[in-house]
Amino acid sequence: MLVEVLLCVAVLLLLHLWSNRPSTLPPGPRRYPIIGSGFADNDSVKRLQQKYGDVFSTRFGAVDQVFLCSYKLIKEAFAKTEFADRPSWRVFNFLSDGEEAGVIFSSGARWQASRRFLLRQLRDLGMGKSSMDAAVAVEAKALVEDFRRIAGSPTTLPDSISLVTLNVVWQLVASRRYNLDDAEMLRFLRLIRVFQEDVVFLVLPEFFPWLNYIPAPLMRRLSRQDWLQKSAKQANDMMQEVVDQHRASLDPDNPRDLIDCYLLEMERQKDSPSVIFNDTDLRKNIFDLFSAGFDTTSNMTRYVILYMAAHPDVQRKVQRHIDEVVPRGEVPASRHRARLPYLDATLQEVHRMASLVPLGVSHAAATDVRIGEYVIPKGTPVSACIGLCHKDPRYWDEPEEFRPERFLDEEGKFVAQREGFLPFGVGRRSCLGEALARMELFSFAAALLQSFTFAPPEGRKVDLGYTMLPGINVPKVQELLILPRT
Ligand code: HEM
Ligand SMILES: *[C@@H]1O[C@H](CO)[C@@H](O)[C@H](O)[C@H]1NC(C)=O
Ligand SMILES: *[C@@H]1O[C@H](CO)[C@@H](O)[C@H](O)[C@H]1NC(C)=O
Ligand SMILES: *[C@@H]1O[C@H](CO)[C@@H](O)[C@H](O)[C@H]1NC(C)=O
């Protein structure tokens, strides 16, 4: 009996030692073998912050993760290259045949080169500037027309909200635009979503390495790998076709879009010793722009509409300002923007309240790196609790109140940046498409609110809650009334 008891104690002790956090990691909840301490999502990080403070660590399965929950800490950390890597999970390279490629999930020299290139090109191609304005205005008009079609009785918001943002990325990347009911466009849309939503199974072995011992045929079935691979091939073939068309009609003196610029860069760099610019990388960069650029912006547009329906006083004020600045029959555009500070402030406040990407996109420590008294080992995923910062009473008074005035100064001028505000992240990895996203949101919101008033259906309330999807919290699908303004 004594032997059994001693054995049990010994085993428990071993398990305890095995599963405990390395002493240099920030504090966190108890770890158990195999499961770790559980999955940390937008809601649990709040409890963990209250218990362990602004820096804590958890373990999901076999992987330690660090969370930063104060704006000051996040800003300091993410300004450093030591925090600018991404975790090296195989799933991120699914679309590029297992090779690291593209910008969102690459690290080190490849990431730096891609990011520098994309930032320069996006700026030159007019992201956030007036040359992109025309393209966005066309989509804003199409959106209004589509809304007019379904106005009058309670309806869920139409798919055109996604399709117009998809078109903006297409325009930037390949000078293309599709009609909102184009079959090829819908096929492409479905393909991209496959990789955002259905790859969850592929990421699990990173956290639960014992899954690698499941016989391969069974694992392939469970993770639907064959089907995913077929979809990946379809997506890549589709993209390669677009690239090849560009190559065939390339005019070196007049690059039309991002693909043209990339092809020219590829040519320039072909003799450099560290070539990273090739077709695989180009296709992945394009996928990155699509996957980062369209569901985010379209879901934010949806949030804006829902917040307006829930706050009729704010909606009326925004509409009054639009009417004062933009003549009826004219599509609101960037040139009106400086005179519509209240609309910009309202969009900021929706960003703050909604925190679309509540935990950002995971970074990883590029070397063993110190935060205060803790040491975070190389490769450890590090996340920013963006959603918590946006409701942090140290930065916002009455954080649960929807109050666009927070983003106006005493003279009513728009204040774009505030401490504690980081819907697009902060530092070296911050969103590459922020200027474009802001431009789209402004134009779409202005055009829609110029033409319609949004309200909950008779006797119902707007639900501002969210559905948690991998990486983003999207608004709940619900019916609204779209009322044409006269
Ligand atoms: C409302 C819309 C959007 C929101 C809220 C948003 C938010 C974010 C966030 C939080 C990150 C992660 C930052 C980090 O890792 O610390 C990110 C990264 C990124 N975003 Fe956006 N984004 C939006 C729209 C766009 C658009 C329109 C594009 C491009 C067309 C874009 C391209 C990217 C790219 C390429 C990255 C990765 C940057 C890198 O790893 O260096 N995003 N975005
Ligand atoms: C919001 O994002 C989710 C996940 O990417 C997507 O399934 C959904 O269609 C998006 N909604 C809109 C209106 O774009
Ligand atoms: C692109 O470059 C990577 C290495 O950076 C290489 O593995 C891959 O095969 C290349 N792809 C093409 C199409 O040349
Ligand atoms: C996330 O959690 C915070 C804090 O618990 C909460 O205020 C917020 O509404 C949640 N949702 C989003 C989308 O951030």
Image (cartoon, rainbow, N blue to C red):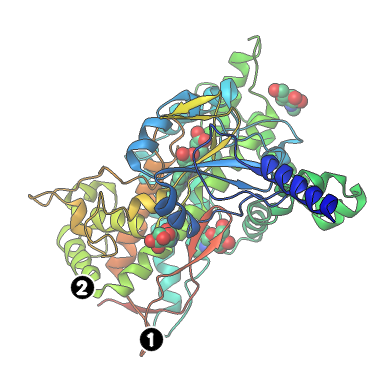
Tell me which label, 1 or 2, sits earlier in the chain.
Answer: 2
Q: Cβ of disc 1 within 8 Å of ligand 2?
A: no
Q: Circle 1 — which element?
A: loop
- Side of 426 where 404 appears, left or right: left
- Side of 205 where 249 appears, left or right: left
- Side of 60 where 416 appears, left or right: left
Task: Report which residue position mark 1 lands on.
Answer: 460
Q: Which amino acid does label 2 sit on?
A: Asp
Quarter of the view holding residue 456: bottom left
Tell me residue 218's x, y (percent): 90, 54
- Side of 264 where 373 appears, left or right: left
Q: Residue lying farthest left?
A: 411
| Image: 332 above or below 467 | above
Q: What residue type is labelled 1?
A: Arg
Q: 287 or 182: nearer the eye?
A: 287
Quarter of the view holding residue 95: top right
The tag on residue 45 is none
Residue at screen point 72% across, 38% down: 90
Q: 144 or 269: nearer the eye?
A: 269
| Image: 6 above or below 82 | below
Q: Is residue 118 among what the camera can see?
A: yes
| Image: 127 above or below 111 | below
| Image: 397 above or below 93 | below
Q: 351 or 132: nearer the eye?
A: 351
Asked if labels 2 and 1 touch by Cβ distance under 8 angstroms, the answer is no
The tag on residue 313 is 2
CA gap, disc 1 and disc 2: 17 Å
Q: Circle 2 — which element?
A: helix
